[in-house]
Amino acid sequence: MAKKTTLLVMAAGMGSRFGGLKQITPVGPDGQVILDYSLYDAKKAGFDKVVFIIKKEIEKDFREVMGKRAEKMMDVDYAFQELDKLPAGFEKPEGRTKPYGTAHAVLCARDQVDTPFAVINADDFYGADAFKKIHDHLVNEGGTGMVSFRLGNTLTENGTVSRGICEVEDGYLNRVTEHTALDKNSGFAMDTPVSMNFWGFEPSFFDVLETSFNAWWKSDHDPIKGECFLPFVVDEQIQSGKDKVRVMETDGKWYGVTYREDLPKVQEAIRELTANGDYEGL
């Protein structure tokens, strides 16, 4: 029997970024949004279930806009990233309105996941090759993994971007370092591997997340704006020798609407992929 796998989609920020789910910008010829293509690619790669990590306040709209479409492809469940969803003994800081970061987002889905799982951002287009590689890794090799992209395939002509610059040796991640304000003139080679927040984990990683989040909470951080990020947790595991992270490289091109001016290029790329028959039936 084939090993079951789950896709975790971090979507808690969609409402605030797009001004309400009903204003999600279409990129496909029939009104599809980027997440539609990710779900299609995930299903094709072999994922059995998707868990959407959202805010409770957008649940109704999300189920209507995305949930019903997702249910046609695979099993669907929901996890809620809320400010008061904290380990025992912790209380939300007074005045805090900002989420606690991507590590906390994934931790909020603990009760919905009991299989190896991948994690993606809801508003990034990763491509079919990336989904196939992370799924095959989870099923065949197992353990923590990451899909890396070539820096040049993740840049925009309309401004700078933030990316996790990766140091890779013999197929394993040595370090991931966040860099902001990257463009083609930042001094990095265009084939430098970068993280786009596409990770694969075993269910036991939730224990790691809880320990790391608890340590972060007790550390010296800004109680109003500080965040605990998933790449920081992974890098901490690598540096302490507690985990090895397999890196799967893809030559695929990443697409996202970082700037409003990016939209026409994303729409054009999707039209070309659709014309090539890559998303038949979507």
Image (cartoon, rainbow, N blue to C red):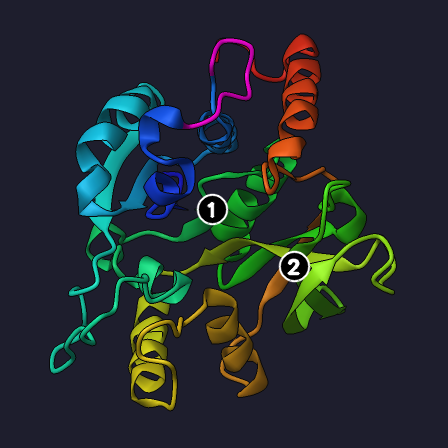
Residue 234 vs residue 202: left or right? right
Please give the range of residues in magenta: 24-31
Report crowding for label 2: few under 14, some 14 to 19, many 20 or more residues within 10 A (C-alpha). many
Q: Amino acid at mark 1?
A: Asn
Q: Is residue 186 above or below residue 33?
A: below
Q: Is residue 140 above or below residue 268?
A: below
**One can see residue 7 in this view:** no
- For image coordinates 87% across by 59% down, the residue present is 189
Q: Is residue 115 above or below residue 84?
A: above
**In terms of sequence position, does the residue under pointer 1 or pointer 2 come before the other?**
1
Q: Which residue is mark 2?
A: 163
Q: Which residue is mark 1?
A: 121
- For image coordinates 23% across by 38% down, the residue present is 58
Residue 226 vs residue 162: left or right? left
231 or 139: nearer the viewer:
231
**One can see residue 48 in this view:** yes
Q: In what element is the residue under mark 2?
A: strand
Q: Amino acid at mark 2?
A: Arg
Q: Looking at the rendering, which quadrant does residue 109 occupy? A: bottom left
28 falls in the magenta region: yes
Residue 70 in the image: state x and y as whole percent: 33, 25
116 falls in the magenta region: no
Q: Quadrant of the N terminus?
A: top left
Q: Looking at the rendering, which quadrant does residue 250 occupy? A: top right
Q: Are marks 1 and 2 in contact (CB under 8 Å)?
A: no
Residue 224 in the image: state x and y as whole percent: 31, 74
Residue 100, which numbered label?
none
277 or 242: nearer the viewer:
277
Secondary structure, magenta segment, majority class: loop
